[in-house]
Image: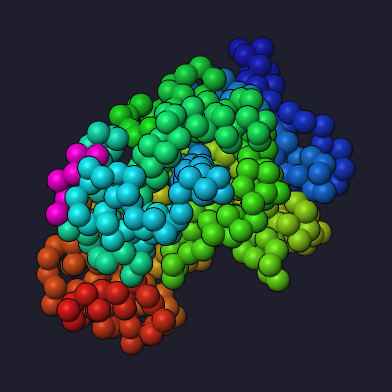
Amino acid sequence: MKNQFLTFILFANLLTTPLYAQTDPLSKRIDSLMQAAHRIGVFNGNVLVMSKGQPIYKAAVGFADGSKQYPLTLQKRFDIGSIAKEFNGLSIMFLAEKGKLSVTDPVRKYLPELPAWADSIQIAHLLSYTSGLPASPANTDQAIGNELLAMKHLANSPGKAYIYSYSNVYLQQRIVEKISGLKYQAFLEKNILKPAEMKRTVIDLPVNDTTMAIAFNNKYINEVPRETTTGWPRLTVEDLYRFMAAVDSYKLVGKASVRQLSEHFGEGESSLGEGRFENGELVWHQHHGSNFNYEALITHDLKNDRFVILMTNNQNFKVRQLTTAILSILDNKPYTVPKRSLYLELREEMLADFDAGVAFYRTVREQKKDMYDLSFPIGDLVNTGKFLMRRNRIDDAIRVFTLGLLLDLQDKDYAIACQFIAEAYKQQGKADLAVLYAQQAIRKDPDNKIVRSILDQAAR
């Protein structure tokens, strides 16, 4: 029994011991942060911190899967969720630079089988997610393709509103294939993976492959592989660094193309997540992605020449706070260890039993403030509502957004809650209620372009 206990202690230490020599004080502080985050259950994954071309911290922290029997290694591959949309955006701009297309071309020029609405969508609209294509629950290429062929009308005029619809990605991939004559996977291997020297990246590697870190939830239950769309890169933390470095040094496409991919509509994300230029130079690139309990955040602070890359197979939505803490450590400033995510647990509670979820929310706010992060409660509620909307639980989503209106809110946050109530009612075909809440939102935030587009459509 004593020997078993000692073995467990040694194994537990291995799980939070970095696999790279951490000798300087900054590395030790980062390691202390990541070990603490793992102990309280908000991070399990791989970390790479680079400064001025040198690795400051590189570690595998935690388990390779929910069985807790195998330690994670730096060689494990991860899914990166929405960060993958950089690959299709770069592919489009690569072809544009070769003179094979113009981003102002209509989509139907290359995909003539699509209905007439495709004449009004420019490729640039696909890149900025302003095509007017509605969000869809379809989860395979064939299902999305069939849905688009049968679709009669767009959700709104192209260029007028941001809708994060995967159909934009799907059409970009099909355009790349049509113009290049290559399957999308082969195009990426030739024009992105090879020049970026991403030797351990595999497109559409099955998530249950032995080289993958297997995603699991906070009850240590492994994700069951699901049928999904194609074009997903599965890669190591070092390959993700190579990718980001190649993008931001214009190794894959030129500066003008990177700038185009950084353009965003209103509060929506660009194809590069958040790419910020100052005086004509890229100074910041950050992109978050999540997918079935995988989560990743890439951050490149070009002003200070440093990268922070976090990849996890146990999504807890704390990678932003951990990145902020790591940057604080690099600046020799104080930092805090993140608490548990209210949103992550609230969404599952409400999905299983909405009323029980509301009770859980109230209990946390009244009795568990020390355990959970309650720094941005409207964000937790809005994200929970969006989660329910994606699962067609529209009435419950409206109740969650409305619960958010009871909080003491800044005008912009109040407007965001009203915006999503308006979008939910619009999705239900309740135009009068959609307009009512859109008007409430615009009174609080006159610059909200998404709400303005709802009102403009209602006026026509």
Relative depth, front residue between 287 and 61:
287
Look at the image and give the residue range highlighted in magenta: 145-152
Q: Residue at x 67, y 30 (%)?
A: 197
Residue 221 vertical position relative to residue 211 in the rendered view, above or below: below
Q: Is residue 146 left or right of residue 232?
A: left
Q: Residue at x 82, y 41 (%)?
A: 54
Asked where in the image residue 441 lies, by quadrant, the reply is: bottom left
- The quarter in which the N terminus is drawn is top right
Q: Position of residue 280 (x, y in %)?
A: 68, 67
Q: Is residue 76 left or right of residue 406?
A: right
Q: Is residue 282 visible?
A: yes
Q: Residue at x 53, y 56 (%)?
A: 261
149 inside magenta stretch: yes
Q: Position of residue 84 (x, y in %)?
A: 49, 42
Residue 250 vertical position relative to residue 278 in the rendered view, above or below: above
Q: Residue at x 31, y 78 (%)?
A: 452
- The quarter in which the C terminus is drawn is bottom left
Q: Is residue 73 left or right of residue 52?
A: left
Q: Position of residue 16 (x, y in %)?
A: 67, 33
Furthest residue toward bottom: 443
